[in-house]
Every structure is written in C-alpha cells, then in structure tokens.
Image (tube, rainbow, N blue to C red):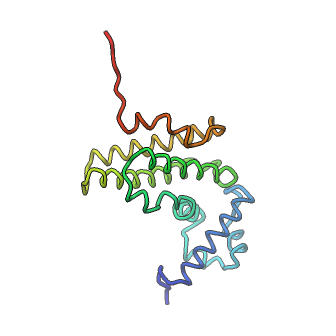
Amino acid sequence: MTQSKTDPRFLRTRKLIMDSFIELSGQKEFKDITVKDITTEAMINRATFYYHFQDIYDLLEKVLSEVLLVDLNNSIFEKSNLNEESIIRIFTAITNFQKSLSNRCHRGYEDTISRIIREHLEIVFYKMLLKQHNMKEDAALKTTAVILSWGIYGASVEWRKNSMDTSPEDFIKLSIPYILSGITLDFKN
C-alpha cells in the first residue's frame, strides 16, 4: 500500500532526505554528491529515495524550490502591494538565497537555480500585481511580472558579483523610484 503525500511519515522522510542533501551540499560540490551519499546520511534505502524523488536533479530542484526559497512563498507577499517595502523584502530574500548558495551547489548549476528563482519571482510579482489592480487575469500584468522577475534576479546576480560590500537594501533602493513610476526619457532636439 502506498503512503499518501500528506501522511506525516511520508513528509518526515521527504524532509529527512532534503535535510541530508542540504547537509552534504555544505560539505561537497553538487556534482560530487551521490544518491548513496544521501541515503547513507539519511539512513534510508535507495528505494525510499526513489519513492520520493526521480533522481538527484529532481531533489536539487525540490530543495531549491521548497526549502531555500521559502521566503518568496511567504503569503505576506501575496497580500502586499508592489511598493518600496515589498521590493526591498523580495530583493533581500533573493540576495540571502544567493549568499546561502555560495558554499553549496551553485557552481555548474546556475541555469537551474536562476530558472527556479525567476519562476518563483514571476509568481510572486504576478499575484501582487493582480491584487494591486484588482484583476483575476491579465496578459499585460503577466508580462510585467516576467520583466520584474528577470530584472530583480539580474540585479541580485549583479549585487552578488560586484556589490556585496553594499547592503542589498541600499543597492536596490537606488532603482525603486524607476521601477515604481516607470522610466521616462526626455529627448531634446
């Protein structure tokens, strides 16, 4: 008989596997972590691992989505308007995530990590924009959410590479007036 995905034993085992992976990722590069390493750390068998995850890449994606990006899934953002405070909080959550990856499985998996971050950001921004404009669905707001997600992610990468001596709050505050009010260019003849 199979366990329900809401069964407490299922959830505990899944969390144990994810925690073991996080522990191992602090000790070695992702490319060097094997399913055997994870099953040994979690004290489970291979069949149990594969019952919960398709492979190690599925585990990586789930860990990034469910554990490390929990700040972005916070319902506070869904209930907030898009304003200076929410942009700062989102950017800080992303930069904290970027810092936490510096010792973990970042190198070589930038594409997977950036896709996951952007997808989460897009969802958060879209929900905020829909709420702010009191709409159920809107193609223009969906596109705006995509642009915001790529922009905020790109800014977090820029901050990580070149500006870590500046706080994330100070770094993003410079651009918030342009994000919120749009960019207007005054062309002179």
The location of residue 111, given as percent across then percent down, is 54, 48
Looking at the image, residue 189 lies above or below residue 165: above
Residue ranking furthest to the top? 189
When asked about the image quadrant of residue 178, the answer is: top left
When asked about the image quadrant of residue 140, the answer is: top left
**Most foreground residue, 159 or 150:** 159
**Most foreground residue, 30 or 65:** 65
Left or right of 20 in this view: 152 = left
Q: Residue at x 54, y 78 (%)?
A: 11
When asked about the image quadrant of residue 161, the answer is: top right
Q: Residue at x 50, y 52 (%)?
A: 117
Looking at the image, residue 2 lies above or below residue 65: below
Residue ranking furthest to the right? 27
The location of residue 167, given as percent across then percent down, is 61, 41
The location of residue 165, given as percent across then percent down, is 66, 38
The location of residue 83, given as percent across then percent down, is 40, 46
**Most foreground residue, 9 or 182:** 182
